[in-house]
Amino acid sequence: MFAYIARHPILDSDRNVYAYELLFRDGRKNCFPDIRPDEATSKILTGSHLTLGLEDIACHKTSFINFHKETLLHGFPSMLDPESVVVEIVETVPTDSSMVTACKQIKDMGYKLALDDHNFDPKWDMFLPYVDIIKVDTLRSDYETIARNIEKFKQAKVQLVAEKVETYEDFNRFRDLGFDYFQGFFFAKPEVIRQRSLPTSKLALLELLQESSNRDFNFERVNGIFERDVGLSYMLLRFINNPTINKRYKISSLRHALNYLGEVELKKFISILALANMGEEKPMELLHLSLVRAKFCELVSQAKKDQDNPPKGFLVGLFSLLDALLDQSMEHLVQKLPIDEEIKQALCGQEGRLRNYLSLARAFESANWLALIKLSGELDLSQKMLHGLFNQAIVWGNEIRQTVSPHFPKSQVRT
């Protein structure tokens, strides 16, 4: 049995991540798997090829988890932490007294409850006294119906999540209507009302990016660029002293740091720095998603025994959201970047191994399990191994995100 999990971010009105919805491949319609309650948490989180805990998967944010009828009625996994888990009631559960009683009991245990895919049918009103959050599918309900019902939920002190928000226009519209949280990949698409230029004023970063794209890598030139920029030097030392990168040595000098990292790792770090700088004023989740994709694509490339320098798998994942970061078309952007032609082609959707690696990452992100099965077969890589690689990428992305963002907020569960 595979316990694959995908995660979808839920953002607040400032486009910061409030929570992640976790989608389980084992369960019906991506719900928490229907197994005995006394083994549910341990079996899913440690015994079924899942090497991470919920806190790692959700980056220490709140976890929204879907539960179907039988689990809510007879086998709710009470080992889950009520301080960090929101129980989602899917729209297929029966609206009867037994289900209301089950929700009351779960609520009394300290859990928050959410109604998923709410369609404003009055039959769901019996759940309102026990519900903290309502998720509205913005594609299934028309705007007028949603607007007409907002006040009722506000008066009941229920928070609202707008689901399937796919454009910035929709985000702004539902935010102005009074929604608290937003789910959908609007943040990972270009914002057409703006045009951002490449950061040509960041000369040092562009020089570093140019150097890192060369096979003839010159440590002296790179060292000179870092020495001219105190901020970049600080970020390099901060990065290399992260336990995920370096568990044994305390690095205190710039040249020691460059030598310790070596050519390939230094090229990756330079690319991360450049991307983080380009993404100023954008949701941090964009950088986070880019980091996870980068590491995952690199690990897949290693599993396929690719011998690229600079590491093309890493770079194609890292730059895969560049259009959203800079609000320009990918085809236009890649022509300005000093990166390999194969990477440019993959970023623009052309067929090839790098595009397949990126498609694998997207399959995990969107819980597209059929695509994962198909791609794993084409690449001759086991699904179990790929899941382990994606877990590694999540952990690495969590750590590096904190390193490259000096203002990274401490994780907390909102009340």
Image (cartoon, grey):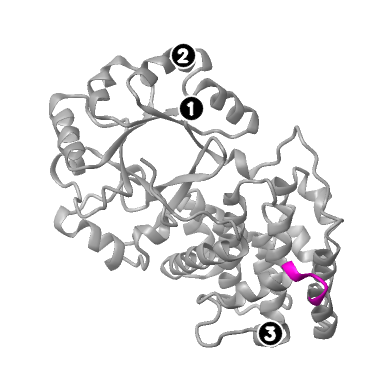
Q: CA distance from mark 2 to mark 3?
A: 62 Å
* Residue 234, percent from left and from top: 68, 71
Closer to us: 403 or 377 = 403
**Residue in the picture at 24% in, 58% down:** 41
Q: Is residue 138 above or below residue 30?
A: above
Label 2: element kind: helix
The three-letter code of the residue at mark 2 reads Thr
Q: Is residue 350 visible in this depiction of the protein?
A: no
- Where is residue 190, by image quadrant? top right
* Residue 384, percent from left and from top: 41, 68
Label 1: element kind: loop
**Badge 2 or badge 3: first in the primary sequence:** 2
- Where is residue 345, by image quadrant? bottom right
**Residue in the picture at 26% in, 52% down:** 81
Closer to us: 371 or 123 = 123
Q: Nearer the viewer, mark 1 or mark 3?
A: 3
Q: Which residues are magenta?
A: 227-231
Q: Is residue 335 above or below residue 311?
A: above
Q: CA distance from mark 1 to mark 2?
A: 14 Å
Q: Which residue is mark 2?
A: 145
Q: CA distance from mark 1 to mark 3?
A: 49 Å
Label 3: element kind: loop
Q: Which residue is mark 1?
A: 179
Q: Which residue is mark 3?
A: 253
